[in-house]
Image (spheres, helix red, strand yellow):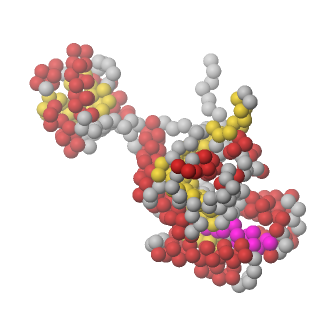
Amino acid sequence: MITPKRPSGFNELLPADQLAFNAMVAIIKMSYEQYGYAPLETPALELAPVLLAKEGGETSKQVYRFSKGDTDLALRFDLTIPLARYAAEHFNELAFPFRRYQIQEVWRAEKAQAGRYRQFYQCDIDILGSKSSMADVDIILAARAALLALGLKGVTFSLSHRGILSGWLASRKLENKITPVLRAIDKLRKFGEKTVADELKASGLKQEEIKDIIKFVNLKGSPRDVIKAMRLLDIKDDRFIKALDELEKISELFKASGVKSNEYVFDLRISRGLDYYTGMVFETYLASDTKIGSICSGGRYDNLLGQYRRDPIPGVGASIGLSRLFSAIKDDLKNGPSNPAQVLIVALGEDVADYSLEVANSLRKHNLNILVYPGFEKIGKALGYADKLGIPLAILCGGNEADKNVVTIKNLKSGKQTTIALAKAAAAIRKLL
């Protein structure tokens, strides 16, 4: 016998959890569409040279890549680069600024652990074709609306800007170290200072430089305090100045949009490890679960389409890590049903099988979810089946019901039952649900 076992890091859900997961997806879709984002799906497989045109380093090591004949293929590791390929391929068919949401699975061969999987869902929103800070803010507002719609409280958005650290490093004559420093700093919150210091040392930085970098990025706080402290440094680098101006503008637009000051902070440790980010970046954390990591992240990537077009299109986006988020809150949802059916129909004999199907057909026309028990076993077994699946009501169809064109509705929670004309059954069921 072969042991039934999944590969490590590849998650699957039992029916009750899957229903709760699907409900979360529906809420996020509704929130994104309320902000004017259109749905999009792209293939799971991309041509590897296209998918990896911008990426290298750690990301390329995490990609599931293989050949089929002469074709070099890879599973997508995020939804942003496939979006860039899509926008470039369909450029003349799209209206810009192009706004889309995409909820699909991605694959990364990274270390599997609690809340972090190798196959997982992302829920993305992006705006392509706008350089305005209004687009940056719109993305975060839409993500915030989705998280609030899910009932999450104590959500904090931690924002930074790649231009701040880049400009600061350039002012200290470390221009050639910007990329490795950004990648290392992205690991600071997760792995700690020692790991980051070791990585910076391996990049050729001196001990004093490493100490200064870690001290600099550990500055965080209210937008006003961080911006004031940065301006006092009097750094003349254009990237640095532009980054501060953009963060200040974002803060002003947040205030106008009703975002409270305790809902976001400026945190220079946020740099995002992916190479395509160019401007504002952010990560989002739950105050109730600090171990789960960021549940929503993103930022601006103004040069991403440059790999596919000569006139690169600016972009900004956000991604909710739905699989990670679900793992953090599913314990609050585990008492839900294991089946979407609202009513189980039980035929009390083979001679009324046709009537039970007529009843099911009639009720489905009223947009009720109906499950017909497939068999004619003891009624106790059928009702036990409904109870195990979390179905609240049962309809009993016997010869008497078929002769009179009625149904007997049984409330499986209270045990009460009533017999009613089939024509009135849908309304009666609605009142009991």
Image position of 365 (left or right of 322): left
Q: In this figure, what is the number of numbered marks?
A: 0
Residue 181 placement: quadrant: bottom right
Magenta part of the protein: which range? 155-170
In the displayed image of the protein, which residue is found farthest to the front? Answer: 92
- Quarter of the figure with the C terminus: top left
Q: Residue 99: give x, y in percent of width and height.
A: 51, 56
In the displayed image of the protein, which residue is found farthest to the left? Answer: 404
Residue 419 visible from this viewpoint = no
Residue at 49%, 75% (x, y): give it: 255
Image position of 6 (left or right of 388): right
Q: Residue 8: give x, y in percent of width and height.
A: 65, 37
Q: Vertical placement of 162 versus 289: above or below?
A: below
Quick check: is 158 in the magenta stretch? yes
Q: Residue 138: give x, y in percent of width and height.
A: 51, 64
Q: Vertical placement of 95 versus 69: above or below?
A: below
Residue at 75%, 59% (x, y): give it: 183
Image position of 386 (left or right of 131): left
Residue at 63%, 77% (x, y): give it: 245
In the displayed image of the protein, which residue is found farthest to the top? Answer: 351
User: Which of the pair 305/66 is nearer the observer?
Assistant: 305
Residue 176 placement: quadrant: bottom right
